[in-house]
Image (cartoon, helix red, strand yellow):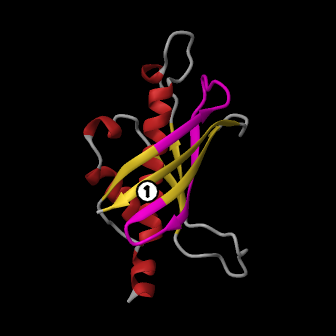
């Protein structure tokens, strides 16, 4: 049954859930899901983690003065990316809520799309722990590192 679930859950289902589960203002970020990692690749390493790659396109509406993408937008993006990573780890929809999110901003992001590489570090019965690396799509340099915890409902 779990193999059937894994085969059924992929990028199409993740995109559908992004459009149906999240609040309308999150959808206003125009996020796109670029990749889903549900099962380890053949011969994959022992430290493989399920996750997702998302893109937040640059928009002046997300910027504070000086043309820098606001921290609030980046944090919402990271939180959303981590939910999608949890969906991948669970191989489908499961209600959850953010318990904690710590963001370390490393440098400003300006005039560039931002990529999120969200990974589930540990998935338990009632809790999930993850990390997200936010990077500039222009030069692939890290913008922020995020760690989070989610309660599985």
Name which residue lies at 71% across and 76% down.
44
- State the residue in front, 114 or 2: 2
Q: Is residue 133 above or below residue 7?
A: above
Count how many numbered circles sit on residues in the image: 1
Q: Quadrant of residue 138?
A: top right
In the picture of the structure, the residue carrying the numbered disc 1 is 84
Q: Is residue 23 magenta?
A: no
Would you say 101 lies left or right of 46 here?
A: left
Where residue 137 appears, as percent x and y from the top left, is 64, 38
Would you say 83 lies left or right of 46 here?
A: left
Name which residue lies at 61% across and 22% down.
110
Q: Is residue 104 magenta?
A: yes
Q: Is residue 107 above or below residue 130?
A: above
Would you say 38 lies left or right of 93 here?
A: right
Q: Is residue 10 visible?
A: no
- State the residue in front, 104 or 142: 104
Name which residue lies at 42% across and 71% down.
90
Where residue 28 appears, as percent x and y from the top left, is 34, 34
Mark 1 secondary-structure assignment: helix
Q: Is residue 110 above or below residue 142?
A: above
Magenta-drawn segment: 101-128
Q: Main secondary structure of the magenta part?
A: strand
């Amino acid at each position: 049954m779990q193999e059937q679930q894994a085969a059924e859950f992929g990028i199409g289902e993740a995109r559908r859930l992004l459009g149906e589960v999240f609040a309308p203002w999150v959808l206003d970020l125009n996020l796109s899901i670029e990749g889903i990692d549900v099962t380890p690749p053949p011969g994959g390493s022992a430290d493989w983690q399920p996750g997702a790659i998302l893109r937040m396109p640059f928009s002046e509406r997300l910027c504070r003065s000086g043309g820098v993408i606001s921290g609030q937008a980046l944090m919402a993006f990271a939180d959303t990316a981590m939910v999608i990573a949890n969906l991948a780890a669970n191989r489908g929809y499961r209600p959850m809520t953010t318990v904690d999110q710590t963001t370390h901003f490393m440098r400003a992001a300006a005039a560039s799309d931002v990529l999120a590489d969200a990974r589930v570090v540990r998935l338990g019965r009632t809790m999930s722990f993850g990390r997200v690396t936010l990077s500039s799509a222009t030069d692939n340099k890290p913008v922020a590192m995020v760690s989070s915890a989610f309660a599985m409902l």
